Image (cartoon, rainbow, N blue to C red):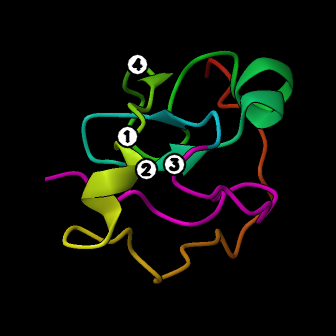
Amino acid sequence: MLELRPNCECCDRDLPPDAEAFICSFECTWCPSCVAEVLKGVCLNCGGELVRRPVRPAEKLANNPPSTVRVFRAEPCAPKTAA
């Protein structure tokens, strides 16, 4: 089951379970602005594709709550560049 992490790893913006967010296959979580403006659709952590995170139906949240653990990058959030 998806963790539904509560924030963007780049800018630390809150991303509640019903917010538009993007994830990679490792569930690194990013807000739409960072995906478009900084990451250009590629996960900064793993280099994987970013896809829209599904919204968990509200009636399922009580028994399947989202994560409360915030993940935030210590390094500046910047796109990877070719060597």
Q: What residue type is labelled 3?
A: Thr
Residue 33 spot, x, y in % from top left: 83, 31
Indicate which label's residue lies in the foreground, 1 or 3: 3
Magenta region, residue range: 1-18
Q: Distance between the residues labelled 1 and 4?
A: 9 Å
Residue 44 in sight from this viewpoint: yes
User: Is residue 39 rendered to the left or right of residue 22?
Assistant: right
Please report the residue visible at 42 percent of the width from the left and 36 percent of the height from the top. 55
Q: How far apart are marks 2 and 4 (CA)?
A: 11 Å
Q: Which amino acid does label 4 sit on?
A: Glu
Q: Are marks 2 and 3 in contact (CB under 8 Å)?
A: yes
Helix, strand or loop status at disc 2? loop
Q: Which amino acid does label 1 sit on?
A: Cys
Please name the residue that numbered disc 2 is placed on. Answer: 28
Q: Based on the displayed image, in which of its 4 quarters is residue 41 positioned? A: top right
Neighbours of disc 3 within 10 Å: few (<14), some (14-19), many (20+): many
Indicate which label's residue lies in the foreground, 1 or 4: 4
**Frontmost residue, 19 versus 80:** 19
Please report the residue visible at 43 percent of the width from the left and 32 percent of the height from the top. 53
Please name the residue that numbered disc 3 is placed on. Answer: 29
Please name the residue that numbered disc 1 is placed on. Answer: 46
Q: Distance between the residues labelled 1 and 2?
A: 9 Å
Q: Distance between the residues labelled 3 and 4?
A: 12 Å
Q: What residue type is labelled 2?
A: Cys
For residue 49, the mark is 4
Q: Based on the displayed image, in which of its 4 quarters is residue 12 positioned? A: bottom right
Neighbours of disc 4 within 10 Å: few (<14), some (14-19), many (20+): some
